[in-house]
Image (cartoon, coloured by chain):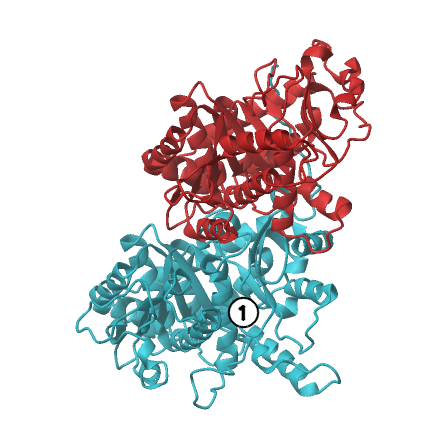
Amino acid sequence: MTQSVIVQVGQCGNQIGCCFWDLALREHASVNQKGIYDEAISSFFRNVDTRMVGDGGSISKGKICSLKARAVLIDMEEGVVNEILQGPLRDVFDSKQLITDISGSGNNWAVGHKVFGSLYQEQILEKLRKSAEHCDCLQCFFIIHSMGGGTGSGLGTFLLKVLEDEFPEVYRFVTSIYPSGEDDVITSPYNSILAMKELNEHADCVLPIDNQSLFDIISKIDLVVNSGKLGTAVKPKSLVTSSAGAFKKQQEKPFDAMNNIVANLLLNLTSSARFEGSLNMDLNEISMNLVPFPQLHYLVSSLTPLYTLADVNIPPRRLDQMFSDAFSKDHQLIQADPKHSLYLACALMVRGNVQISDLRRNIERLKPSLQFVSWNQEGWKTSLCSVPPVGHSHSLLALANNTCVKPTFLELRERFMRLYKKKAHLHHYLQIEGMEESCFTEAVSSLSALIQEYSQLDATKSMPMEDLPRLSVAV
Amino acid sequence: MSIVTVQLGQCGNQIGFEVFDALFSDSHCPQGLCSKRENEAYQASCKERFFSEEEHGVPIARAVLVDMEPKVINQTLSKAAQSGRWKYGQHSCFCQKQGSGNNWAYGYSVHGPRHEESIMNLIQKEVEKCDSLSGFFIIMSMAGGTGSGLGAFITRNLQDQYSNSLKMNHIIWPYGTGEVIVQNYNSILTLSHLYRSSDALLVHENDALHKICAKLMNIKQISFRDINQVLAHQLGSVFQPTYSEEGSSHYRRNPLGIDWQVRPPLSGAPTLGKMSANKNLHFNTSLANLVILRGKEVHSADLGGFKDPALYTSWLEPDNAFNMWKTQRAFNKYEKSAALVSNSQFLVKPLDMIVGKAWNMFASKAYIHQYTKFGIEEEDFLDSFTLLEQVVASYRNL
């Protein structure tokens, strides 16, 4: 069994991270009734005997003593991290695994990346090494951050290079929150594009998410929950956004519901690696199957169902609806429409009481309405995990490597160009040591090259499928 | 004569468990529909082949379990132990912490050499427990990383180390519409490598098994457990003791001994659970067929139809190509049952399809970087393609 380390960077990253750990504890609590520290729980948590002083005290088996999250918390402002450390989850975090500063990055990628990067490089390395040492077999670093700000965007992507150099064998999965259209940070296009270059070059896999989509999903759920239609009582704990039963007793903050969706995403992504099932899927399989070319590693995700109806008997139609929803543009976590774009590869990760025949039936049913690239017509990767998420009897996470990410990138580039043409706010960046205009132009070309690749693939969409001539051999 | 089974990867281990369970259940079935002495001889033969005896314990399967991550092996061991009727050896498994990631190259080039010694030692230990070894039965899937890549590596090692023993690889052909996106690459690499070191490839297609569950057995929600149980049932009806045609007084000594005339290519296995109806074989030319009959009236069964020259390729005599084994002892309480193991053109179409899809993907170079990362170059792919095209052509020419 392998372990993963979560690195949460910046305000957004840490807030999401907090929701993630809360949900992870809940999930393991509901599965692990006997309180024995097993391999599943060890993937995200250490078992520590807190009576021991110093760094020792890791217990590998037996009863759970005190769980410590395998996490590194980084923020250049103290507000969010302090709140976490004073909240109900304070005991879950190892106080030595934090890096904070006071001044913040001022929504400036260059400050995050260049200034704080060099300032904290040693410390960052030290904390990462420590967390790796605590792992028996470290498989993956999950980085959670936003693209539009300064710390998450700048320092978060600085980290990627460090991780690549220091731990080349360990996967780097990045969950990136992209700025929405009406983002209130004016310089978010600059920050995002500068960060994109780093993601292109140093991440193994990126899961882009945007706030607008999360918000739309929440509106949808609210609509159903509050509609009070007869016979459609929704089980309260089953909302993909819910914090019901959470350890955090304080008042729910406005972003909590949205962050919970992302937390669910991460848990579902790793469920088949942690829990048993008839067709397991480990994290290294995600990269292997969904990344046909190294630079095309952006995966669009969708989670279904968003809620479970109180109705206990789920007829197959409901199950099939779960699969259909996974491909609808309303359920994607970024503004994208995979159905009308080209699929390079698709993964379906199912949890709960679903069997291979249900999976096959739905793939057969949905295949005709989806377009796959010519060399990957049956580009499906599937997994079945027996353990459902908390509050649901089954769930589905769909990961698509699809050209529908292109519009997001195009828009980002457009917003960037609008600012850059006027050289607006550029001086804030250029005054930082190490920053030149070439950083900007290189970043834009990197993005343009990526967009170009997607466009080329899109162009093959309507071409007729030709079977290439095979090798002819003498018998 | 004993068989040592090597279960590789998630698929191999899940299936292996069902196979041993089916073999055990059948051999301990009280209603053998034959004399007590007959039943005892059957049981003893089955036990010698597949299980070893501990002093005061339950029979231990003659198996080595290999996987690169622990979840499945743990499950398999506990399922066997729970049944209380048979179990796996305590030290018969080899496990690592991180899987092969569906990457054939990783299974073959990284896990293989790294763990070669440990795994071969385990196999050696199991072999030493046998009075006489008749061969190896290696269960693996083609689509994943461990079963396929590591399986190919281990088979080559077995060829080097035990060149006189028969090696039969049991291959699971994945569903046509992907379980794994790179399954076609993994499959062609596996098949081409096994071709050079295995003696026989026994194939089960997931699609075919799925259809059996759906159409013949009417299971509504088919799980992998159902599929594996059908598979185990078919294998059991082939591997359980039988008499050869000459009707000796002892059970056939070599359960894996299949006398193929030609250098063993792929052997297809559409096996039947019930009395076989007249099969429509006009389009399917065979190299060899083996029919196994169990139960009542086996001696009076007329199998002349199987000797029809039209079934076989022109350069073979039906008498040489057809074999029949039988026993009065019923299998799994079926009054009569029959199994057919066939080396024919049956698998040409699926093989051709896999090669075609892999070729299309290869032309675009998709995913190749994942393989070259671990030492499998484009050259290796081309070699595999060439070999398999030759196989397809050879079979087509029958």
| Camera-nearest residue between A120 and A22 | A22
| Camera-nearest residue between B343 and A349 | B343
* Left or right of B14 on screen, residue A113: left
- Which percent across, then down, holds residue B295? 72, 31
Helix, strand or loop at label 1? It is: loop
- Amino acid of disc 1: Pro
- Specify the quadrant that holds the C terminus of chain B: top right
Q: Which chain is cyan?
A: A
- Kindly give the residue lying farthest to the left in the view shown: A54
- Which percent across, then down, holds residue A275? 48, 60
The correct choice, above or below, for B12 with respect to A361 in the image is above
- Kindly give the residue lying farthest to the bottom in the view shown: A251
Quadrant for residue A14, please give it. Answer: bottom left
| Camera-nearest residue between A5 and B268 | B268
Asked if residue B386 can be seen in this view, the reply is no
The correct choice, above or below, for B360 with respect to A187 in the image is above
Residue in the picture at 60% in, 16% down: B259
The number of callouts visible is 1
* Left or right of B372 on screen, residue B218: right
The correct choice, above or below, for B135 with respect to B322 in the image is below
Quadrant for residue B333, please give it. Answer: top right
Residue in the picture at 62% in, 39% down: B26
Quadrant for residue B354, please give it. Answer: top right
Asked if residue A36 can be seen in this view, the reply is yes
Q: Residues within 10 Å of mark 1 (few under 14, many from 20)?
A: many
- Which percent across, then down, holds residue A457? 59, 49
Per the image, the residue denoted by label 1 is A389
Residue in the picture at 42% in, 54% down: A204
- Which percent across, then down, holds residue B70? 41, 51
For disc 1, the chain is A
The correct choice, above or below, for A226 with respect to A94 in the image is below
Q: Colour of chain B?
A: red
